[in-house]
Amino acid sequence: MRQSRLTVALATLTLTFIANGRAPARSPMDARQAEETRYDGTVAIWYGSHFENTGSHDWGPIKEWNGPFHPILGEYRTDDRKVVRRHLRWLRRAGVDVIVYDTCRIQPELTLLDLPKQKTLQLLEDELSRQEKETRKLSLVVWMEKWNSNPTPQQYQFALDYVRKNLADRDFYYHLDGKPLVMTYLNGPAPELDRIDQEYRQFLTLRRVSPAPQTPGWKYFGLAGDKECMTVNPGANGFMEDAFIAKYVNHQSVDDNALRQRGKAVSQQRADGQYFENQLLQAREVDPKVIFISGWNDWAWCLQIEPAKEYGFKYVDMAARLLGRASETRAYREP
């Protein structure tokens, strides 16, 4: 998703998809056992906004470089209440418990000082505050990030204060270890932000997220993690984000033909859903406090389970089934 993820993630994906040439080895927990045994931990999922002014980061690359997947909703905007409501219904259908909202914004790029202005966040807050009639209640977590760089200490502290004062005490905000959870993704070392984290640990549960296996904290790419959090994903390939940064940020030439050919191979790398299934089964075997799915709608990274024209609701319904939550989500699969 972000520039610093590219090298680490590309190496990881090369090992996973190219060297192995197949999905991860099957877990000792088989699909039937998973279906019949409910996962009682928390299922969290990454959620990004799609309402940039031009849409060039989100939908443009799919057209330009033969993106392999296209959302059922078309080139949508998440500042549209109807879109957010549709997403919430589908997230409930998937058996998700917690929406991890990424504060990162592109075109125009916003800082964490603009957090109160984010329309998608406002809509999520409003909708999640009115779930009385829902059989499945969703919670919210804020994910701190600035695209292609790190936030300044001023920006970071402002955002933590915003969560403390405006979200942490809301009924729908998710708590881990007895305190409101905030997740942070950084594009490189930030010792000054480490010091701020120490100041806020009495108020918040803070978790850093990284794509690098050797970096402490929760992981962005699966299968990875421990008894606290296991990260899973349906497969990922950042070729469109990589090309976007090269062409539109760094103003370098890119091989459009090679990119279009690469797009054709991405759907094969997902192994028709087997990659996601095997990761979920292995995460179930660990039985962590949290299973983190990355992500819901990161189309630039081909890292989404949101329904697409190419695979329909395959990943949504697979998640509910392998989490042992098919029966409790049935109402959200009905018209």
Image (cartoon, grey):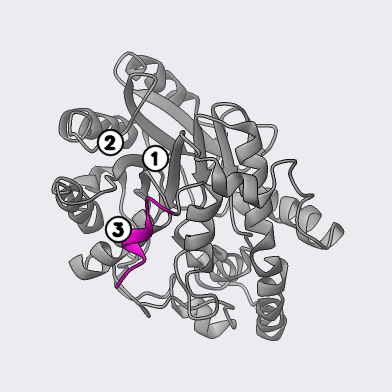
Q: Magenta part mainly helix, strand or loop?
A: loop
Tell me the amino acid under the disc marked 3: Leu
Magenta stretch in the rendered image? 327-335
* Front residue of this view, candidates 124 and 281: 281
Q: Residues within 10 Å of mark 3 (few under 14, many from 20)?
A: some
Tell me the amino acid under the disc marked 2: Ala
- Position of residue 313 in the picture relative to residue 174 (left or right): right
Residue 195 drawn at (x, y percent): 42, 19
Q: Earlier in the sequence, mark 1 or mark 2?
A: 1
- Position of residue 62 in the picture relative to residue 281 (left or right): left
User: Residue at label 3?
Assistant: 88
| Disc nearest the viewer among 3 and 1 | 3
Contact check, label 1 and label 2, Cβ < 8 Å: yes
Specify whether residue 121 is painted magenta: no
- Name above or below for residue 23 compared with residue 308: above
Residue 105 in sight here: no
Residue 67 in sight here: yes
User: Residue at label 1?
Assistant: 151
User: Residue at label 2?
Assistant: 159
Q: What is the spatial separation of the Cα atoms under label 1 and label 2, in whole angstroms?
A: 10 Å
Q: Earlier in the sequence, mark 3 or mark 1?
A: 3
